[in-house]
Amino acid sequence: MVSQIKSRFPIFQQHPGLVYLDNAATTHRPQAVIDAITNFYVADNSNIHRGMYELSANATTAYENTRRKTAAFLESDNPGTIAFTTGTTESINIVARSFVEKRLHPGDNIVITMMEHHANFIPWQMLAKARSAELRIVPINEKGDLDLREFGKLLDAKTKIVACTHISNTLGTVNDIAKIVDAAHKKDIPVLVDAAQSAALYALNVRELPYDFLAFSGHKMFGPFGTGVLYTADKYVADILPYNFGGGIIQDVTLEDTIFKKYPYHLDAGTPNVSGVMGLGAAIDFIKGMDTKQAMDHVNDLTTYCREQLLKIDEVKLVGWPKSQGGIISFLVRDIHPHDVASFLDKDHIAVRAGMHCTQPLLAFLETPATVRVSFSIYNQRADVDHLCDALRGLIKFWS
Amino acid sequence: MTKEELQQLYSDKILVHGKDPYHFEKIAYPDVEILAYNPMCGDKYVLQLVKGDDSIQSAYFDGFGCALSKASISILLRKIEGMSIQDAAAFCKDFIHAIDSGSGIPSDDPALNVLLELRNFEGRVDCIKLGWESLLSGLGEES
């Protein structure tokens, strides 16, 4: 299965020896996604929602069809719940500034977790400061699992949103979103889920996981850079205000005032990333064309196998040991700095991430200045893990 | 740079500083304390200077970072001892310019030349410059 899937990603033809273990930073793109972007420029290029000619009408139809496709991807029957953004970061910022801000009063609170990426941390921290509200942080245990009992205690009548990652980009922890949503909804608190690390392979079915906001990026699910999605539940759609101002989002402009279109169209100020959205649509088709259960099992198998193999190396220390770990593992190698580890692995054609992974509060809690991180996708295989471990053994021997 | 070249570089020139860095300790009463921090990777050092009448009498550092940043700061601190604040700042500026522009600086110090050789080390230039840029910025505030 893997070799067949891998052959659909041209990067591996350009770099046949590449062991790419940095999928949490960005995945590679299959030929189908590259073709979709290219074909748009070659055959269908035109601006959308503007031109009174066939080419523009076709581009608009294709763009809106991708909105339908994205809604269907989440099992939402309303395409009007889907806004296209530049990525997870913008999606979260839209919810912070265009939804929560006006509902947040001094003394209210926002609940996030210790393991959030800065993209799901700083927008809430800044908002809480600006509105004299409290930022409440759900703690984690030493294994890297959320303390859900403590989470329940942090929710009260003044909680205006819960914002939580589905999968930790540093530890790989897969959070129990169903439980989180259920606890918050019992108190009528909306929940935003950062699905940046999970959108590619995890079922994000809104019927089963009734989150209120979902944010994810195209480039971490085989799609183009600069594309993202914000899903907003029907019940909150009317409460989202425009985020940026400009052309394309208005119904009427007079000298005195402006009347805006409704969500999601009032978020498209300026020209949207039309070709990117075409690529995003192709990425969704690519995912839907896979046996996603088999793909997820494969990534889970790689995660377990990698953990087992790393544990066989005495000088390697895993950072985090969550109950459920989704394709991401952080570790340390003796006293060798993660950057030095990454530089040496690079010479064995192994691409890993080293550093703080945009999770400084988490690393401060773990009293770890930086980690080496490996992250898997559908085109990785057990041989990649073996290659990694051999290279690590070589590095340890060299460093001794 | 091949793996063999990287190993050669580290074993001959980097690890010697990384494993036994110059004045790698925190002193109790420095005259100047400068934070060298790269938030992208987590490298964080405190540079400490003791001033003499007209010069930097001694320099120390402490903290966490990769072998490259540690070696680079080790070499830097050894070089600036005895320099005036102005000369140390100019020295940092020249070095950073040399790294960025690819030009050389007049020096017969082999350690310094090793750092300059490393400017083509993919993705690691910030590690080399960290201490130098922080010191330059800190000395600017001092003068």
Image (spheres, coloured by chain):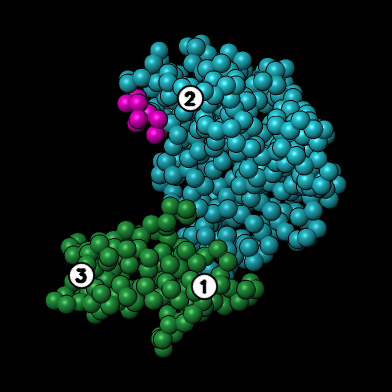
**Label 1 marks which chain's residue?**
B
Q: Amino acid under label 3?
A: Val
Rendered view: A161 above or below B22 = above
Q: What's the residue type where badge 2 is placed?
A: Leu
Quarter of the image with the N terminus of chain A is top right
Residue under the image location 81 percent in, 58 percent down: A13
Q: Amino acid at mark 1?
A: Arg
Q: Check disc 3 and report its element: helix, strand or loop.
A: strand
Residue extending furthest toward the bottom: B108
Can residue A389 be seen in the rendering of this structure? no
Span highlighted in magenta in the image? A125-133
The residue to which callout 1 is attached is: B119
Q: In the rendered structure, does residue A2 fall within the stretch colored magenta? A: no
For disc 3, the chain is B
The image quadrant that residue A396 belongs to is bottom right
The image position of residue B106, as x and y in percent, is 41, 86
Residue A319 got which mark? none
Q: Which residue is mark 3?
A: B50
The residue identified by callout 2 is A255
Q: Say which of marks 3 and 2 sits in front.
A: 2
> Residue A330: x and y, percent?
56, 47
- Distance, label 3 to label 2, CA atoms, is 64 Å
Dominant SS in magenta: helix
**Mark 2: few, some, or many residues within 10 Å (few <14, many ≥20)?**
few
The residues tagged by marks 1 and 3 sit, at their Cα atoms, a distance apart of 30 Å
Q: Is residue A20 above or below residue A358?
A: below
